[in-house]
Amino acid sequence: MNCVLKSLRAFNVNALSISLVSAANHYLFKLRVGDYRVLYDILYADQVLLIHRIRHRREIYKEK
């Protein structure tokens, strides 16, 4: 999990090739970090990176 935190600290929105994932009523962005996936949204007006989930790749897309 340390590699996920390290990737998030070095996060640069402009330098990424961004992948979109379809969520319930909207799209989220996906960041791949090894076997983990981070689903997030970017609130540009507030300059906020809103993280929705951090999970192993086999668990990230399962609905609860």
Image (cartoon, helix red, strand yellow):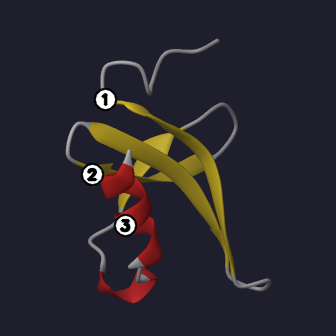
Determine the residue located farthest toward the left in the rendered image. 34
Q: Quadrant of the C terminus?
A: top right
Residue 36, by quadrant, is top left
Q: Residue furthest right?
A: 46
Marks 3/1: CA–CA distance? 18 Å
- Residue 2 numbered mark, or none: none
Across and down, in percent, residue 3 comes to 30, 55
The answer to whether residue 23 is above or below residue 5 is above
- Left or right, 6 with respect to 34, comes to right
Q: Which residue is mark 1?
A: 57
Q: Position of residue 33 (x, y in %)?
A: 27, 51
Comes first in the chain, label 3 or label 2: 3
Query: Which numbered disc, 3 or 1, marks the residue closer to the eye?
Result: 3
What is the CA distance from the residue labelled 3 to the residue labelled 2? 10 Å
Q: Secondary structure at mark 2?
A: strand
Q: Residues within 10 Å of mark 1 (few under 14, many from 20)?
A: some
Q: Quadrant of the N terminus?
A: top left
Few, some or many residues within 10 Å of mark 3 (<14, 14–19, 20+) = few
Say if 25 sits above or below 41 in the image.
above
Q: Is residue 27 left or right of residue 34?
A: right
**Which quadrant of the figure has residue 12?**
bottom left
Q: Earlier in the sequence, mark 3 or mark 1?
A: 3
**Hey, what amino acid is under mark 1?**
Arg
According to the image, label 2 marks what residue?
33
Q: Callout 3: helix, strand or loop?
A: helix
Q: Which mark is residue 6?
A: 3
